[in-house]
Amino acid sequence: MNCRVFMKEAVLLAEEARENGEVPVGAVIVKDGKIISKGRNRREKEKNALAHAEIEAINKACEALGSWRLDGCEMYVTLEPCPMCTGAILAARLSRVVFGAYDERAGSCYSAVNIPEITAEKKPQIIGGYMEKDCKQLLVSFFSGKRS
């Protein structure tokens, strides 16, 4: 298992999102050491509040596996999931979530609230701050560009 390779793929997806005017968030889902799905933010393009990277990756993983149960799957995502995405992660029964940058305002795996801790029977393993510097820099440069 090479976590760095998977997170680098998520970072590439986040960069693609940024190039398309989206908040730079990318996600990949891995099963048995292989990427089975990818997602990136597409809210602006799709004009849809649900078009988050994690939701796109979960949808594609369910299609790839032919099941809504993603037991044994891991998600690598550049930003701590929001409450909506954390709910989808729990509903899909992902086994592990590795995220890069913490989100003090809306993060729901540690920062603003810890939804898995207060709601989940079967909690996924959650690892935060993985390649945090790279993931955070994408967000900082995106939002500083928006402000100037």
Image (cartoon, rainbow, N blue to C red):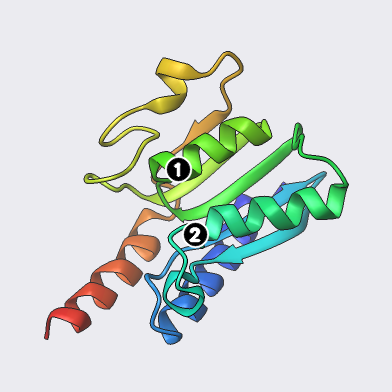
Q: Residues within 10 Å of mark 1 (few under 14, many from 20)?
A: few
Viewer-side residue, 103 vs 33: 103
Q: Position of residue 60 (x, y in %)?
A: 73, 58
* Three-letter amino acid code of the residue under disc 1: Met
Coordinates of residue 1 in the picture (x, y in percent) = 72, 46
Place residue 122 in its image quadrant: top right
Quarter of the view holding residue 139? bottom left
Q: Secondary structure at mark 1?
A: helix
**Spot occupied by residue 102 in the image (x, y as percentages of width and height):** 32, 47
The residue that mark 2 highlights is: 52
Residue 94 appears in view: no
Residue at figure coordinates x 72%, y 59% from the top left = 37
- Label of residue 84 in the image: 1
Q: Amino acid at mark 2?
A: His
Q: CA distance from mark 1 to mark 2?
A: 9 Å
Mark nearer the N terminus (1 vs 2): 2
Dot label at residue 20:
none
Residues at discs 1 and 2 in contact (Cβ within 8 Å) = yes
Residue at the outermost front position? 47
Q: In the image, what residue occupies the spot 69% across and 53% down? A: 59
